[in-house]
Amino acid sequence: MITICLLRHGETAFNADGNKYCGRTDIELTDKGIQQANRMNELLKDYSFDYIFSSPLKRARNTAAIASGDESRVQTDERLIEVDFGNWEGKRSEEFIAEDPASWENWLSNPEEHAAGRTGETATQVIERLSSFYNELLEKYDGKTVLVVGHNGVNRLFMSNQLGMPLKNYRKIVQENSALTLITLDKHKGFNLLKLNA
């Protein structure tokens, strides 16, 4: 079994500005986002992490460094990067829905086969790379405690898939900025969700 503290990064300017979609845009944490990561550092003091992994994007990498208190140990992995949102990137949902309502409806009803923002990733593609990452964790680090810092889209899709939910329902899971989700993965017992948004 592996114990995973799964975080979403702290607040960014895109989050603060009406939740603009921020997939691969590499922006910094806001002052509030840094404060959120510092709060997580306090909350995680009782955990001893064997390994620390992060998306390569600055908002996740900096959250991992602050939350763990050990920037030198943060390993980035491309498989943890946020969903490629295609034409939705940098826009609020009301903007891109007005521009292309069919694209949004396709994503809501069948994200496994329809790419986000028409030119981005499908949920199936996201799950494939996340499964590769987490399966590798389980093979290499069984018995360890690991900190993983990712993003709202990828983290929710991963949890939805592990919980056996239809992927179109991933938005029903709320993961707050720099809040703790505690999970375990086991080769025999599978996935267990112990805490959400602590």
Image (cartoon, helix red, strand yellow):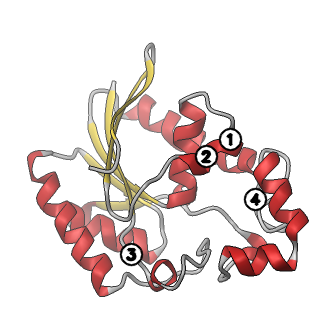
Circle 3 packing at 10 Å, graded few (<14), some (14-19), many (20+), is many
- Which of the two marks, 4 or 3, is nearer to us in this view? 3
- The amino acid beneath tag 3 is Glu
Q: Which residue is mark 1?
A: 167
Labels 2 and 1 touching (C-beta < 8 A): yes
The numbered mark, 2 or 4, whose residue comes first in the sequence reads 4
Q: Residue at x 33, y 63 (%)?
A: 178
Q: In the depicted view, which residue is nearer to us: 1 or 97?
A: 97
The answer to whether 18 is drawn above or below residue 81 in the figure is: below
CA gap, disc 2 to disc 3?
A: 20 Å
Label 2 to label 4: alpha-carbon separation: 15 Å
Dot 3 or dot 1, earlier in sequence: 3
Quarter of the figure with residue 166: top right
Marks 2 and 1 sit apart, C-alpha to C-alpha, by 5 Å
Q: Is residue 87 among the parts visible in the rendering?
A: no
Task: Tell me which amino acid carries mark 1.
Answer: Leu
Q: List the residue tagged with mark 4.
A: 121
Q: Earlier in the sequence, mark 4 or mark 1?
A: 4
Q: Which residue is mark 3?
A: 11
Element under disc 4:
loop
Label 4 or label 3, whichever comes before in sequence order: 3
Instruction: Describe the element under mark 2 as helix, strand or loop.
Output: helix
* Residue under pointer 2: 170
Report helix, strand or loop for mark 1: helix
Q: Nearer the viewer, residue 191 or 58?
A: 191
- Position of the N terminus, as image quadrant, is top left
Q: Between residue 82 and residue 145, name the one nearer to us.
A: 82
Q: Give the amino acid type for the residue marked by disc 4 in the picture.
A: Glu
Q: Position of residue 100 (x, y in %)?
A: 87, 73
Q: Residue at x 75, y 59 (%)?
A: 121
